[in-house]
Amino acid sequence: MVEPDQLVGFAQDAELAGCDSVWVPEHLIWPDVIRSKYPYRDDGAPPVPSAVNLYDPWVLLGGVASKTTTIRLGTCVYVLPLRDPLVTARAVATLDILSGGRVILGAGLGWMAEEFAAAGIDFRTRGARCDEIVPVLRSLWSNEITSSNGRFVKLPPVHFNPKPPRGAKLPIVFGGESEHALRRAARLGNGWLGTWHTPESTRDVVARIGSYLAEYGRGDEDFEITVMVSPREVTEQVVVDFYQAGADRICVGSPRAPLRVWPEVLEKLGTVLQSPALR
């Protein structure tokens, strides 16, 4: 993992290489004992040790924003149901203003019941909470007055200023692999962020999301497909295969990749991005 004192330089190098965006992970805490199964590994083991360093993504990306000009700033992913939507809305809007409209809110429901227990939130309600939070965020970012009388979000009429540059169109992309997750992305989001897919499995998800978008009366013009791949998998052919499968963006990352591998990865990406097949 890249530490804060290394992140700004890394993001600057990525911007120079022509990369579209930089993404940071997020968790509020890491429990000492985890019985929840990590959904993106066959053995269910957590992706990193319990003593892993965790940082506030908005503070990290604020530092990146101050030293870059074009690269977009994403979270991969922010555990949305753990937070009061007012706090989330303020943090995201502030960074979007600071960066000139470069934020992508990558959001997820979370997978660790222990993390929710530590925050005093019922893990079983995270989906319903998310479904209430997203419309409130978009309203705060665009409407003069916002209120909510939901089951989880109760808000008297409030003003929220300043608005982020893109208002309610600030992109929210959802992680998750279940049918519920894909439907939520199609219903509420501007994109989907997939984890450890192949081009073949990506093609299947793209088709499923396309059918859900149509079901909800939406087109795909404001919807992006992002797929995470391991640094060791990055070749021109792999990137082309994902692109042809319907991916709009490849997010190269690994929770365990040491810093020393990234200069080579960025050099490789810079070469791949010049491929005529991607233009």
Image (tube, helix red, strand yellow):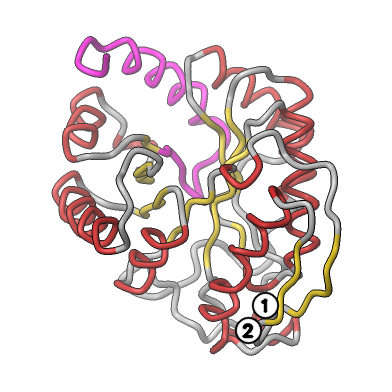
Q: Residue type at mark 2?
A: Glu
Left or right: where 260 falls relative to 217: right
Label count reads 2
Q: Which residue is mark 2?
A: 114
Task: Answer whether labels 1 and 2 touch (C-beta < 8 Å).
Answer: yes
Q: Which residues are magenta?
A: 251-279
Horizontally, residue 79 falls left or right of residue 240, namely: right
Asked whether residue 71 is drawn in magenta, I would say no
Question: Along the polypeptide, which appears first: circle 1 or circle 2?
Answer: 1
Q: Nearer the viewer, residue 109 or 139?
A: 139
Query: Within the magenta stretch, is there residue 256?
Result: yes
- In-image side of 134 versus 118 (left or right): left
Quarter of the image where the N terminus is located: top right
At 38% from the left and 46% from the top, the residue drawn is 228
Where residue 132 sits, quadrant-wise, is bottom right
Query: Which x, y percent locates residue 177?
Result: 34, 66
Residue sitting nearer the eye, 225 or 269: 225
